[in-house]
């Protein structure tokens, strides 16, 4: 059963035992007081902490942790893992996708995966992606973050044999509609077996990769 932090927040301390990895805290809609109480409760149990979508002004009021302003993630401690559970390559169409790439990267490493970033290799100059195919073959899973029309995910899924997780990003003009065009393009992709996350959900993509690696280790 979960254990309650006083008043209005509950942290799932048993998640690692149940499904193999700890809870990640969504910080954007939580108050500083709520986050501080969750952090204090985790520290009492020497439990690692990762807070996603944590605004800078909130991070400043959380003690003894590391904050990444690009991903907007705050972290304290890491889960105890003897060796990486698998290798994840994180690709992006352009540098504007960096916040989602970094979110996926930090989440993946927190979850015990070895991760590497391949940024700005989108389809506007397709040779940038094709030139990396040999390197990409070494990874167990690929996470592809792309905005505008989101084509990089389909290209990767059509060229690479490992599982590919597409993450549409809220990057692009006009009809890109905050990532809706990329989301719809990935969902309607003709590349067989492409998996698609919600818009800007780098955390979810890393968690999906971790689940895949957990199945493989079993």
Image: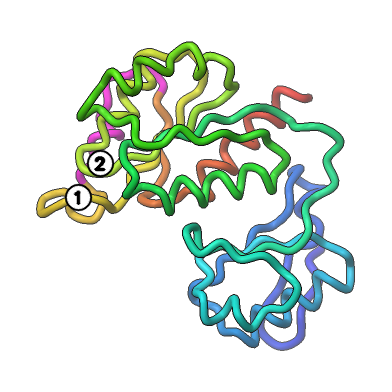
The foreground one among 178 and 74 is 74
What separation in Å lies between label 2 and label 1 (alpha carbons)?
Answer: 9 Å
Determine the residue positioned at 41% across, 49% down: 98
How many numbered tags mark residues here? 2
Q: Which range is magenta?
A: 181-193
Secondary structure type for disc 2: helix
- The image position of residue 214, as x and y in percent, is 71, 31
Residue annotated with mark 2? 182
As drawn, 71 above or below 44: above
Which image quadrant: the C terminus? top right
- The image position of residue 217, as x and y in percent, is 76, 25
Determine the residue positioned at 27% across, 26% down: 189
Q: Residue at the far left: name it.
A: 174
Residue 206 got which mark?
none
Crowdedness of circle 1 by 10 Å Cα count: few (<14), some, many (20+)? Answer: some
Direction from residue 55 to residue 5 in the image, left or right: right
- The image position of residue 89, as x and y in percent, is 53, 30
Determine the residue positioned at 78% across, 59% down: 77
- The image position of residue 59, as x and y in percent, is 59, 76
| Rendering colour mode | rainbow
Tell me if residue 184 is in the magenta stretch.
yes
Tell me if residue 71 is in the magenta stretch.
no
């Amino acid at each position: 059963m979960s254990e309650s932090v006083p008043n209005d927040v509950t942290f799932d301390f048993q998640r690692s035992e149940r499904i193999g990895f700890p809870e990640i805290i969504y910080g954007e809609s939580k108050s500083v007081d709520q986050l501080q109480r969750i952090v204090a409760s985790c520290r009492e149990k020497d439990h690692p902490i990762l807070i996603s979508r944590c605004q800078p002004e909130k991070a400043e009021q959380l003690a003894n942790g590391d904050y990444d302003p690009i991903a907007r993630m705050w972290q304290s401690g890491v889960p105890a893992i003897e060796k990486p559970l698998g290798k994840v390559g994180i690709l992006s169409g352009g540098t504007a996708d960096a916040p989602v790439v970094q979110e996926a990267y930090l989440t993946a490493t927190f979850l015990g995966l070895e991760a590497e970033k391949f940024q700005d290799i989108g389809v506007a100059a397709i040779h940038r992606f094709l030139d990396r195919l040999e390197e990409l073959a070494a990874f167990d899973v690929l996470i592809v973050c792309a905005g505008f029309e989101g084509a990089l995910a389909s290209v990767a899924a059509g060229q690479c044999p490992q599982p590919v997780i597409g993450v549409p990003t809220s990057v692009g003009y006009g009809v890109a509609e905050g990532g809706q065009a990329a989301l719809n393009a990935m969902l309607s992709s003709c590349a067989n077996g492409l998996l698609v996350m919600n818009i800007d959900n780098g955390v979810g993509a890393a968690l999906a990769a971790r689940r895949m690696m957990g199945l493989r280790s079993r």
